[in-house]
Image: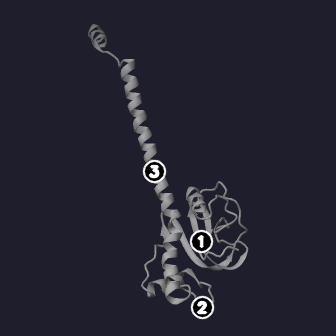
Amino acid sequence: MKMLSNVLRGQRGFTLVELAIVLVIIGIILGAVLKGQDLIDNANAKKIANLPAQWEVPIWAFYDRNGGFPGDSARDGAIDSHAALVAALDTAGLAHPQDTVNGVTVSIANINACGVANRNVMLLTNVPLVAANQLDTNVDGAINGTAGRVRNCGAAGTTAAAAWGTTDPTNITYFFDKTIP
């Protein structure tokens, strides 16, 4: 017992200054990790917000070359389906983005969108709310989801436009042909 007592007397604990330094270092590391995660999240949101523009480039290039939209078999300005659009772009040798990027799926077709008949729209599903807000601000100048080219009209793009909710992820109806109803 006496030996144990001697061992315990020889041990010293950490001083308050040493503990404070360790806590400061841990705080700095946690802050850097959280800031890094914010940077990653913002980069992903920006990548998704740029997705419509990446699709518009080959679509409008096709339009300029051929006088009509890709996938418009009737030549009436209405894109038949996303598959027809992609096939026409591929046939014309125009590169286009993938249909799914960071979990967000893109589909382009002519539908009765947001209560407006026969519109060529881009539907983006499974979009993080921060990316939806960023896209709405970039394109329309405000976050509202009810007006402009970026709207919140449900997963199929057919319901009446509503303000962006708090549900994450959300869906976007993007009127890419630039004629706003």
Q: Which mark is residue 44?
A: none
Residue 9 screen position, x and y as percent = 30, 10
Query: Real-space Cα distance between discs 1 and 3?
Result: 26 Å
Image coordinates for residue 17, horizontal then vertical, percent: 38, 20
Reading the image, the residue beneath label 3 is 39
Q: Please tell me whether mark 2 sits on a helix, a strand or a loop.
A: loop
In the shown orientation, is residue 36 left or right of residue 80? left
Identify which residue, 126 or 21, lies in the foreground.
Answer: 21
Corner quadrant of residue 174: bottom right
Q: Residue at x 60, y 56 (%)?
A: 168
Corner quadrant of residue 119: bottom right
Q: Residue at x 67, y 56 (%)?
A: 165
Mark 2 lies on residue: 75
Display colour scheme: one colour
What residue type is disc 3 on?
A: Leu
- Is 44 on the left or on the right of 125, as rendered? left
Q: Amino acid at mark 1?
A: Leu
**Which label sits on residue 123?**
1
Q: Earlier in the sequence, mark 1 or mark 2?
A: 2
Residue at (39, 38) in percent of width and height: 29
Which quadrant would the N terminus be assigned to in this image? top left
